[in-house]
Image (spheres, grey):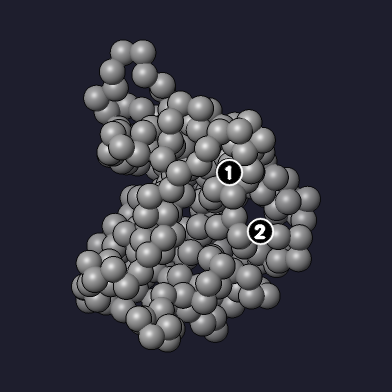
């Protein structure tokens, strides 16, 4: 799995006028090895609202009770995943939609009882990714996990996984060339609002400790730190910019780079 690029698509970067899908297809045609991990929190929240189910987030992550879990499984594993796969395939690409459940890709247990059915990933089985990449397909992964660690009888078989966390775990397990977060911001900013171009892992950890970063940036930085002992680098860039992913692979995009210990 040499040279794999793990790309996390945030829901805010997938609109009617973006170029992300076009970039994915072009990179596949250039024989770039991609694993796509997607989010979709906004869509899940919209569907929960239709059912009048309240939504709660803590540090950028969804608190997942049983009702929320069922919606997460349906929306992320079904609607969002298949829309992305259909978009890639309709433009001439070759993609296969899976979740962390398929092939026991992601295996986990309850991370924090206060967060509900949210997984801490304890194992990543890359066999299904290797098979798909080896057949010339792009795996498009919905962030769900098997509940395989210390599962009480009668508990759900499936857990929710934060999309950023899933991407970081997959990047670590595959020894990715790079982990790329396509977000709706330019990158990580310091306390004065200035874009930080490059950080060491220690400096990124310090941003978490100091509270400089908040909300959805917290799980992204944590995912980068998880991946970096194994991945070459992690990048957080603005996925709303035209051809952001293509420019990133070509080395011309702007954003924040987090590097591990050299």
Q: Name the residue under label 2.
A: 14
Picture coordinates of residue 180, whole percent (x, y):
47, 65
Tell me: 232 left or right of 97.
left
Q: What element carries label 2?
A: loop
The residue at which mark 1 appears reads as 45
Quadrant in which the C terminus appears: bottom left
Q: Which residue is drawn at 66% across and 59% down?
A: 14
Quarter where residue 156 is shown:
top left
* Residue 44 visible from this viewpoint: yes
Give the class, few, some or many, for how many residues have Cα within 10 Å of label 2's Cα (few <14, many ≥20).
Answer: many
Q: Sequence-wise, which precedes: disc 1 or disc 2?
A: 2
| Element carrying mark 1 | helix
Relative depth, front residue between 144 and 87: 144
Residue 186 percent location from the top left of the image: 52, 76
Residue drawn at point x = 67 percent, y = 49 percent = 84
| Residue displayed at 43% across by 30% down | 65
Structural distance between the alpha carbons of marks 1 and 2: 16 Å
Question: Residue lying furthest top in this view?
Answer: 154
Pick the residue in front: 197 or 100: 197
**Above or below 199: residue 208:** above
């Amino acid at each position: 799995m040499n040279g794999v690029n793990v790309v996390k698509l945030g829901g805010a970067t997938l609109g009617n006028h973006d170029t992300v899908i076009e970039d994915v297809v072009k990179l596949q045609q250039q024989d770039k090895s991609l694993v796509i991990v997607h989010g979709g929190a906004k869509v899940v929240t919209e569907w929960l609202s239709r059912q009048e189910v309240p939504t709660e987030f803590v540090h950028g992550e969804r608190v997942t009770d049983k009702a929320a879990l069922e919606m997460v499984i349906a929306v992320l594993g079904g609607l969002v995943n298949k829309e992305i796969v259909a978009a890639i395939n309709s433009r001439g690409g070759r993609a296969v939609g899976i979740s962390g459940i398929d092939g026991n890709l992601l295996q986990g247990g309850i991370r924090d009882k206060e967060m509900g059915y949210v997984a801490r990933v304890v194992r990543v089985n890359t066999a299904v990714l290797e098979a798909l990449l080896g057949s010339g397909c792009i795996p498009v992964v919905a962030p769900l996990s098997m509940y395989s660690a210390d599962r009480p009888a009668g508990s759900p078989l499936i857990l929710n996984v934060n999309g950023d966390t899933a991407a970081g775990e997959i990047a670590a397990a595959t020894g990715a060339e790079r982990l790329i977060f396509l977000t709706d911001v330019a990158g990580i900013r310091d306390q004065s609002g200035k874009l930080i171009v490059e950080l060491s892992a220690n400096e990124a950890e310090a941003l978490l400790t100091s509270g400089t970063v908040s909300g959805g940036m917290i799980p992204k930085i944590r995912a980068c730190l998880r991946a970096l002992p194994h991945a070459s680098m992690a990048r957080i860039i603005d996925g709303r910019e035209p051809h952001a992913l293509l420019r990133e692979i070509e080395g011309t995009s702007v954003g924040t780079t987090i590097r591990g210990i050299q």
